[in-house]
Image (cartoon, rainbow, N blue to C red):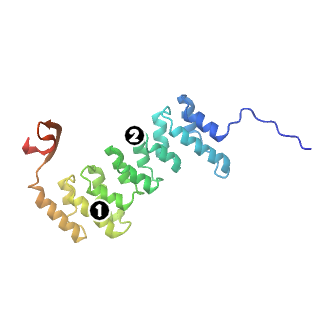
Amino acid sequence: MAESKPVDENYETLTQAYERIRHSHDAQVLHEIARQPLPQRSDQSAFSRATALLEAVAGNLTTPVEDRIYLGQEMPFPNVLVKLSSDPDPRVREAVAGNANDKNWLVGQLTKDPEQRVRTAALLNPQTSWKMRLEGAQDANTSVEALEYLAKQGLGEDAKGPAILATMVRHAVALNPTSPRELVESLKNDPEEDVRRAVKRRLEKGATEKVVTPLPVQSVPGRGPIGLRSADES
């Protein structure tokens, strides 16, 4: 009869290790796990265990923010990136938004983040879908940096993807009220007539547009709350 192997009393199942790390308050231990080299992929069991534990590290807010940012920037694993995409620190979400290993649905969610810096990083990510690029180009809350990037879609080195979708994005940038005049003017010689017409409309309209300034919401008796008004009504 074969002898049974001795049981390692210190052995943790994956579930036990995950829960221990997820609830750990030891920032140094969490830092070390975040930065330690991963096993070779050929050792499938060890590799899978290590990536699962990285998810626990990513979801623990005791993990130093620098390490959470590092994981967001460097990790290619969807389970880790999904966990970090809802991190309360916008710097961490920004790191995830800029990670080219993101799935397009995940980076798409981050194009709707409440923080502009996160939305910008997501819109600049090559994994972002054309639908989200178009919505970003139409959104008046999109940063100038992102609009400048979107204005180049389908042109020169950025001539990738369906030409009609790239044209729609540039067209939307031309009409976006946030686009600076110089950015709109840079599209005057666009190869597509629809974009050139949009530029003309925007430049003609720009001189007479009212500036709308968000003012604090106030309550007026008998009239209810007053929110957005044009600057010349104040």
Disc on res. 91:
2
**Residue 137 position by quadrant:** bottom left
**Image height check: is 103 above or below 93?**
below
Quadrant of the image for the N terminus?
top right
| Residue under the image location 30 percent in, 52 percent down | 146
Of mark 1 and mark 2, the one earlier in the sequence is 2
The spot of residue 165 in percent (x, y) is 33, 66
Between residue 156 and residue 73, name the one nearer to us: 73
**Residue 187 position by quadrant:** bottom left
**Label 2 is placed on what type of residue?**
Arg
Q: Which residue is mark 1?
A: 169
- In the picture, measured across the screen, residue 53 lies left or right of residue 203, that is right
**Residue 4 position by quadrant:** top right
CA distance for labels 1 and 2: 27 Å
| Residue under the image location 66 percent in, 51 percent down | 44
**Label 1 is placed on what type of residue?**
Val
**Image height check: is 111 above or below 7?**
below
- In the picture, measured across the screen, residue 50 lies left or right of residue 83, that is right
Between residue 73 and residue 84, name the one nearer to us: 84
